[in-house]
Amino acid sequence: MDLSLTLSFLVVSIMLTLAPGPDILFVIAQSISHGKKAGILTALGLASGVIFHTLAAALGITAVLYNSAFAFQLIKYAGAVYLLYLAYQAIRDRNTPLAAAAPVQQKGFQLYRTGVLMNVLNPKVSLFFLALLPQFVNHGTGNEALQMIVLGLIFMMQAIVLFTLVAVCAGMVGKKLFAHPGTGKYVNYGKAILYAAIGLRLALTEK
């Protein structure tokens, strides 16, 4: 792989990861409402989903998805429904004190799984990787698929580091909120609005 291309890809990846978007907002929401550990586990799930999209792009599966309107719509609406379900859960738990909600309702694997599903069920991420990764592949050296997989792993690792830092910072904010249990209702309302907005945006936007 070309070192200059790889470094350029890393810089672009960091900028994209830190840009306001569904993933980073999701990590912030989980960290504030359930603590930094919850945010980190969610971040690990989101980053793990990158593996799926990278392999799909490298193996040409994403191209098939892009050319199949039915498959694209199916995955898109599945992701939207899942996010709306998370919004419903947040509304349902609106009167649960933040400090009590974390250990009871948010198990480690559930948080990780939520992150994975949110990432995998967004076909736009697959299309994004299909458009991004080939731009940083050195076609002169061959093994394009392998280069794309390596780039995907680089993206995943930097995302884990940055999301972890974001989770720690947001968790500190959430810890201060624990001293005021009454704010839990408003935090959960905020989460519900965020999840619903992301879900509706995913459902209503085109390729």
Image (spheres, grey):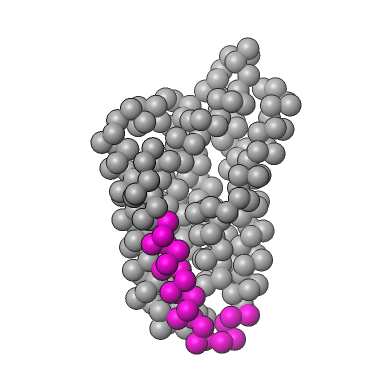
Please, is residue 32 above or below residue 23 in the view?
below
Query: Which residue shows up at 57% across the image and 60% down it?
Result: 40
**Quarter holding the N terminus?**
top right
The answer to whether residue 12 of the structure is visible from this angle is yes
Please, is residue 92 above or below residue 1 in the view?
below
Please, is residue 141 above or below residue 116 in the view?
above
Query: Does the magenta run of residues contain 88?
Result: no
Query: Which residue shows up at 56% across the image and 30% down it?
Result: 133
Residue 10's image quarter?
Answer: top right
Looking at the picture, how far across and down is residue 20, in whole percent? 57, 54
Q: Which residues are magenta?
A: 176-198
Looking at the picture, how far across and down is residue 64, in whole percent? 35, 27
Looking at the picture, how far across and down is residue 12, in whole percent? 65, 38
Q: Residue furthest front?
A: 205
Q: Nearer the viewer, residue 173 or 193?
A: 193
Query: Which residue shows up at 33% across the image and 27% down it?
Result: 67
Q: Is residue 38 left or right of residue 116?
A: right
Please, is residue 12 above or below residue 113 in the view?
above
Q: Residue furthest left?
A: 70
